[in-house]
Amino acid sequence: MIRTAFAVTLTIAYILLVGTPLLIYSLISGDPRPLYRTGVRGCRFAVRLAGVRLEVIGREKIPAGRAVVFMANHQSMCDPPALISVLPRIRVLLKKELFRIPILGRGMKISGFIAVDRANRERSMQAVDEAVAALKAGDSFLVYPEGTRTPDGRLLPFKKGAFVLAIKAQALIVPISLSGGTRILRKGQSTIRPGTLRITIHDPIETAGYAVEDRKEVIKLVRAAVIAGLAEEELPLAPEKAAEELRPLHGIASGGQHEILTLHGFTRSDVDGEFVLYEHPTQGTLHTFPDGSWKHVTREGREASGTGAEQLEQRLAEMESEEGSGELRKPH
């Protein structure tokens, strides 16, 4: 606990004392390179302070002179600084909430990191299109195809967005296996335990010739590579066992919310480690969380949230009763 507090304090001090002047310089000059280089040094500094030793395997497999999409599994908050400290210059797709962090968030934006609004499908696709253009212009990206950190160290299912990005840009994919991160800092915990994080960089996988409709084949190739670099306790569960564990974790039918959403014309379109995503052709998207809470985002980006099936039913009934709003009416 003392080591964690010490590492966090010194990292914050580094951001404030070193990052702030360079952030101002980048804003004035329009040149983000000094800020990025300082950020990389800061990541190395933070990793060492935390007592994390990096074991890097396969660094020579990173293609020279080509824009690539690095795809890594995601075990802990140690993953981003560890990867940024060993990879060539990259841009990163990150959830939009991280950009609210003072100084750091602004620095990431200047460095070309792209915010992803996971609660808004349209904005998420806009972020992907922005990344596709950047890849074609020569910038490499780091993405986490699981979409969230694993709660127990085991590899989660891959989401399609990262692969749509790579295929649209016809870019090389470099799979990366991270092993040992959960033992260092498990999701939901705040104490860092010193240890070794093994980073295995695999042979590049070509997407040239693949169409977006072929993404399942690309997912299989990347997933097999990532699995090859994991320890036994980090391997994904067998499909039948995974389905059994996902059911209570995601609360798909918890409190009658699933039945209510189905009745109102929503369909379940995605599941990840933090929420179940439902979509409606005119009324937007709705996320239900394991604790019984929910969040609704209309097609126009208006948000509402609540807890339990009763509040959810009230929300949907109010929407459907609004006269004159074609966006909110349930289709016939």
Image (cartoon, grey):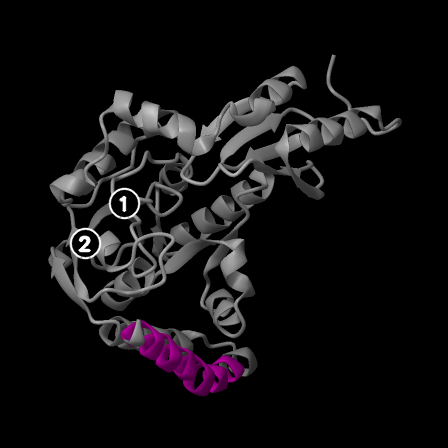
- The residue wearing badge 1 is 172
Q: Quadrant of the C terminus?
A: top right
| Residue sitting at x 39%, y 79% | 9
Q: Which mark is residue 25?
A: none
Where's residue 243, x and y in %? 34, 24
| Residue sitting at x 57%, y 26% | 255
SS class of the residue under badge 2? Answer: loop
Residue type highlighted by circle 2: Gly
Whether 258 is among the magenta residues is no
Where's residue 128, x and y in %? 48, 45
Q: Main secondary structure of the magenta part?
A: helix
In the depicted structure, whether residue 233 falls above or below residue 55: above
For residue 61, side relative to residue 166 (left or right): left
In the depicted structure, whether residue 263 falls above or below residue 174: above
Badge nearest the viewer, 2 or 1: 2
- The residue wearing badge 2 is 180
Residue type highlighted by circle 1: Leu
User: Is residue 163 in sight in this rendering?
Assistant: yes
Earlier-in-chain disc, 2 versus 1: 1
In the depicted structure, whether residue 61 falls above or below residue 257: below
Q: Which is nearer the eye, 246 or 43?
A: 246
Q: Quadrant of the N terminus?
A: bottom left
Which residue range is magenta in the image?
3-25
Q: Residue furthest top?
A: 332
SS class of the residue under badge 1? Answer: strand
- Crowd rating for badge 2 (residues with CA inside 10 Å; few <14, some 14–19, many 20+): many
Q: Quadrant of residue 64?
A: bottom left
